[in-house]
Image (cartoon, grey):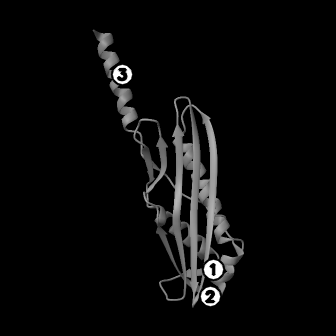
Amino acid sequence: MKIKQLTIAFCTFILSACANQPNQVIISPELVSPKAAIYQTQQANLTVTDMRAGNHIVQVLRIDEAAKLFSSRQPLDSIINTAVSKHLNAQGLELTLSEGTKIEIIIDNALISVQQEMMKYKVNSEIVLRFVIQSGDKTLTNTFRNRGNSNGALTADVAVLERDFNQQLSALLTQALSNADVQQFIRQ
């Protein structure tokens, strides 16, 4: 009788541990700090707009099961706004609500899709950011994209997916902010 009670207690504990698995990921891009201020006495207005259909970052798909979705703790547009603001401020750009240069970053896609099978998984990830910069009557639109694929045995580790996403987002934002066309257009 005691073994039966212990078995039931153990199974209940295991099931409750599985049920309480967090459904959030931590998104915290780290941008490479600029060596010198390239914007001097310039001002701009920065906005970040999330155009994705859903707010999740990771989706784990299994045959005949509902998708398991993981969202970021904070809205992705807020995270990107904070990271880009710090980076641009370090480069000497003063971010204001003025009517001068307007920088809009549009999040078109930011998703890690995991196809989970019994003993293996396949990961496809894609981040697409559109930079729309308006200065006077001129507009520059550049799209930056980062894609990744991987696969492995057993089950995908959400912590590894989170780390990879942060690295991809950091690399994409650094690439966009160091783009010569973007920098020149902001300096106009």
- Placement of the N terminus among the 4 image quadrants: top left
Q: To which residue does mark 2 refer? A: 41
Q: Is residue 54 left or right of residue 35?
A: left
The x, y position of residue 181, in whole percent, is 69, 77
Q: Position of residue 22 (x, y in %)?
A: 42, 43
Q: Kindly report the distance in space between the C-alpha atoms of the residues bearing marks 1 and 2.
A: 7 Å
State the SS at label 2. loop
Label located before the other in sequence (2 or 3): 3
Residue at 63% over, 43% down: 150
Q: Residue furthest front?
A: 64
Q: Indicate the position of residue 56 as horizontal and vertical percent values.
A: 45, 53
Q: Can residue 67 be spotted in the picture?
A: yes
Please tell me how crowded label 1 is: few (under 14), some (14-19), or many (20+) other residues with Cα within 10 Å: some
Q: Which residue is mark 1?
A: 92
Q: Is residue 37 visible?
A: no
Q: Nearer the viewer, residue 117 or 77?
A: 117
Is the Cβ of the residue at disc 1 closer than 8 Å to that at disc 2? no
Against 90, residue 156 (above or below) is above
Q: Do callouts 2 and 3 mark residues in contact (Cβ within 8 Å)?
A: no
Q: Secondary structure at mark 3?
A: helix
Q: How many residues crowd around disc 2 within 10 Å: few (fewer than 14), some, or many (20 or more)?
A: few
| Total numbered badges shown on the rendered structure | 3
Tell me which numbered mark, 1 or 2, is placed earlier along the sequence.
Answer: 2
Q: Position of residue 29 (x, y in %)?
A: 57, 59
In 3D space, how far apart are the residues under numbered discs 3 and 1 (Cα atoms)?
Answer: 58 Å
Residue 64 - label: none
* Residue 10, numbered label: 3
**Left or right for 87, reference 158:** right
Where is residue 139, by image quadrant?
bottom right
Side (left or right) of 104 relative to 31: left
